[in-house]
């Protein structure tokens, strides 16, 4: 299904060869960003498949996105109850078998609760909900979700969360650094007190990635951040997040 | 009916932003006798009938898997209390 641009000046035509790649987007009770994540998949040229938390079924998708929001109202701990949702059995099995899995914000929290990624997120050190356009550095471009970026390049995407402070013990942090598994790092300011400015990480195999900021909100001119790390853009013209989605689509169809 | 109390606290080495905010509020209210506050969680698991060792073991398992995240929290108590003592003197 192709996506109609919401405003006139959206031009980059998706690569038609990517539409065969099917990306599942899971909806939990309280998920907010599933529609945006699915739209990002389509804008990148892929096919989005809606998945339901209560089903033991991934519908043979080629990759899975756990989107942001407040699944189960963040009751108990963010992601703690979602982690035991029926669909997570298939996600965990798939992830261990190499299925590309991306957790954004609350989805990242679900992946840490599911022990697919190490560490955890606690409340922001300043205790406030924060919403801002955030610059990140792509530290690792060898994961399933970051190959479209040059290593060390920067991107600007929205950040919006309350429980975004990444924590792990020193040994785990040293391992992540030593193995190149820090995928995204906050640049300029550390918005939430995350250890070592970490914004996103990957598992050892590179198929599972989690990050707190929201690349799916920076995929369409007119609805993105006011800036881009790649050069001047118009008002809300930032689309730096699109590469996350084209990365996995190209990997699936074997284009890179 | 008896209940099993499970207490969960943030690990000592993890910054507790909520506890810190509460400590600040106490200072502002003039209640200055406390140098720090840490905020945890208490769960009350109600049991119909007798608390057997098997049920207690289930509670310990629940405490370690669902009720706490071992990366950031410690289970500091799993204990059976009689109904009459809930919220009073246990």
Image: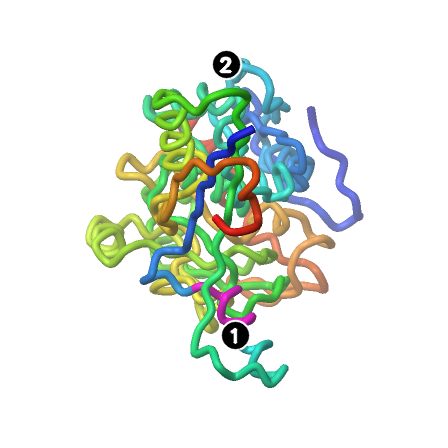
Identify the image quadrant of the C terminus of chain A.
top left
Q: Give the foreground label among 1 and 2.
A: 1
Q: For residue A65, say whether it is visible.
A: no
Q: Examine the residues drawn in magenta and state their main secondary structure.
A: helix
Q: Which residue is mark 1?
A: B23
Q: Which mark is residue A60?
A: 2
| Depth check, front residue: A212 or A149 | A212
| Depth check, front residue: B29 or A92 | B29
Element type at mark 2? loop
| Depth check, front residue: A88 or A213 | A88
Query: Residue A38, position in %: x, y?
Result: 64, 33
In terms of image quadrants, where is residue A193? bottom left
Which residues are drawn in magenta? B16-22
Residue at image position (60%, 45%) is: A216
Residue A52 shown in magenta: no
Identify the image quadrant of the N terminus of chain A.
top right
Above or below residue A69? Residue B2 is above
The reply, left or right, for residue A69 in relation to residue A212 is right
């Amino acid at each position: 299904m192709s996506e109609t641009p919401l405003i006139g000046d959206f031009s980059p035509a998706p690569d038609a060869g990517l539409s065969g790649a099917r990306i599942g987007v899971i909806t939990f009770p309280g998920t907010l960003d599933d529609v945006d994540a699915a739209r990002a998949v389509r804008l990148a040229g892929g096919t989005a498949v809606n998945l339901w938390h209560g089903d033991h079924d991934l519908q043979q998708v080629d990759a899975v996105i756990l989107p942001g929001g407040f699944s189960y109202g963040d009751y108990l701990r963010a992601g703690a109850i979602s982690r035991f949702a029926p669909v997570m059995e298939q996600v965990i099995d798939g992830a261990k078998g190499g299925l590309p899995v991306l957790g954004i914000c609350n989805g990242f929290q679900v992946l840490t609760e599911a022990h697919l990624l190490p560490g955890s997120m606690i409340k922001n050190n300043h205790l406030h909900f924060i919403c801002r356009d955030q610059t990140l550095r792509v530290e690792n471009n060898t994961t399933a979700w970051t190959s479209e970026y040059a290593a060390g390049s920067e991107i600007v995407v929205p950040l919006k969360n309350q429980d975004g402070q990444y924590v792990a013990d020193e040994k785990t942090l040293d391992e992540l650094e030593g193995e190149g598994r820090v995928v995204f790092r906050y640049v300029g300011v550390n918005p939430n007190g995350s250890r070592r400015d970490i914004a996103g990480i990957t598992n050892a195999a590179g198929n599972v990635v989690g990050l707190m900021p929201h690349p799916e909100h920076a995929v369409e001119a007119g609805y993105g951040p006011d800036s881009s790390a790649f050069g001047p853009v118009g008002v809300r013209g930032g689309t730096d997040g699109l590469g996350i989605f084209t990365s996995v689509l190209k990997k699936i169809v074997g284009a890179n | 009916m008896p209940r099993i109390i499970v207490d969960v606290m943030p690990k000592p080495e993890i910054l507790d932003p909520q506890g810190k905010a509460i400590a600040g509020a106490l200072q502002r209210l003039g209640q200055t006798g406390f140098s720090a506050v840490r905020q945890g969680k208490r769960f009350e698991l109600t049991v119909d009938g007798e608390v057997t060792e098997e049920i207690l073991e289930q509670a310990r398992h629940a405490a370690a898997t669902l009720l706490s995240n071992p990366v950031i929290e410690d289970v500091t108590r799993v204990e059976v209390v009689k109904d009459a003592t809930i919220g009073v003197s246990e």
